Image (cartoon, helix red, strand yellow):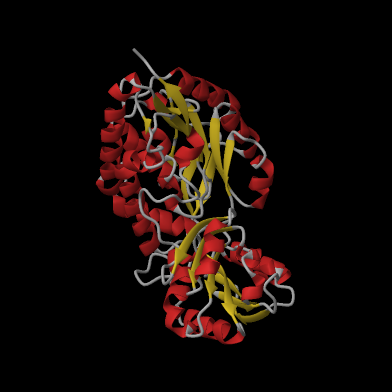
Amino acid sequence: MADLIDLDALGPAGPYRARNRETIPDVTGRPVAELSLVPSLFVRRGMAALHRADTLPADRRAAALAHAGQIFATGIIDGMSRDEYEHTVTRVCGLPISVVRAATDAVALAAQEAYASADAARPAAAVDDWHDPLTRQGRALWTRRGNVFAVHAAGNHPAVHSLWLEALALGYRVAVRPSRREPFTPHRLILALREAGFPDDSVLLLPTDHRVADEIIDGAELAMAYGGDDVVARYGRDPRVLTQGPGRTKILLDDPDWRSHLDVVVDSVSHEGGAACVNTTAVFGAGDPAPVAAALAERLAAIPTLPPEDEKAVLPVRGAAAAHAVERYLLDHAGDARMLLGDGSAALRPAVLQLDRSDAPQAGIELPFPCVWVAPWSREDGVGPVRGSLVLTAITADDALLDELVAEPTISNVYIGDHPTYWIRPGIPHDRYLGEFLMRTKGMIRD
């Protein structure tokens, strides 16, 4: 056990090694790290320290975030180089090494662009500083709804840690409860932020067990919680908590020449190892779904099964027990869907399932690997089957339909044409701008 990586909590007075520690294994079950789990008293004191802490001036926040992105991407942090960090994440969470590398770059870029990305949410008529000369004539002022923001993070993908950086850019102090499945990314990122100039009492890493987790949210004014439908059900009615649940991302394929769009469909399903909320989980095609499903199955079946650290790996890998649990869940919920592809091995091989109607409930099932449901759709079905989508790629020439899709409030993002559902850039909202939740406008006039 002497060779295990020590992942300390990062409290307001620096790193803290708790007596209660959890062993983090890799996909084979081999112990890799020990994660300190902090008790309730430590959480309460940490959250109180966040409330007492000062907020860095805006120019210092912007500079520190940009510097932190560079450190995160290139530095040796807590004795770990970028290559060592990426290899560790790959072996623990099972995502292909290429996906983890891209996530490292994405988090670094998000830090460098966090201030500009956060400012993109500001209304055009509002200023972000009451000292602005425009407030002498009367102006809207863009201001925080609180000072302390809590994050219950997910472990499905390292890039989830790119979003909460905008809260720091806006002047919040932040507490992150990492996923015990993948705590390495937030640990590295918060150490980079501290090295770049954020005080220890302005951004915390608070690993906890489930009994203590809610105290982090209770100790903040606003919070963001990642998870499945259970998390949405638990926090969805709390106006202080922004839930980040399943994406249920879809493609609407309304083109007789659907084969010319097959590349973007396959890429949308399999990119990121199929583990991200922006991966396509359902394809609705005009006409008979069988040819689309068969073509998808043929393409996805050609993906090789490789260890996640292999340069050519595409598929996620889980421990055998976890992989078979995913397989059992899929088979238990497939119902009358026709399975064209799927074998449930420890490397989570792609699954393609054909449905016989557009309103089949299975189309809402999202699993952390390339698993896609293919269903028929017609113009008479309208937008109903594709409601509740984080991203919808719509391949259609029907402008009236596009008007309906863009207007549909339960579809967060609409991509028109051959654009993969995982496309995102700094400054583009993920599930609306985080600033829409964290900020508000006030009327302002001064002498």
Residue 376 drawn above or below residue 171: below
Which x, y percent locates residue 37?
54, 35
Q: Is residue 360 left or right of residue 63?
A: right
Residue 95 drawn above or below residue 398: above
Which x, y percent locates residue 240?
59, 33
Please tell me which residue is depicted at 67% across the width and 77% down the height of the picture.
355
Observer able to see residue 381? yes
Please tell me which residue is depicted at 49% across the width and 41% down the height of the picture.
35
Which x, y percent locates residue 31?
49, 52
Residue 444 drawn above or below residue 289: above
| Quadrant in the rendering for residue 344 | bottom right
**Of the pair 144 and 397, the residue shown nearer to us:** 397
Residue 433 drawn above or below residue 101: above
Q: Residue furthest front?
A: 137
Which x, y percent locates residue 221?
55, 27
**Of the pair 109 and 210, the residue shown nearer to us:** 109
Please tell me which residue is depicted at 57% across the width and 82% down the height of the picture.
293
| Quadrant in the rendering for residue 102 | bottom left
Observer able to see residue 16? no
**Of the pair 202 and 344, the residue shown nearer to us:** 202
Please tell me which residue is depicted at 46% across the width and 69% down the height of the picture.
268
Quadrant housing the C terminus: top left
Q: Residue furthest top?
A: 447
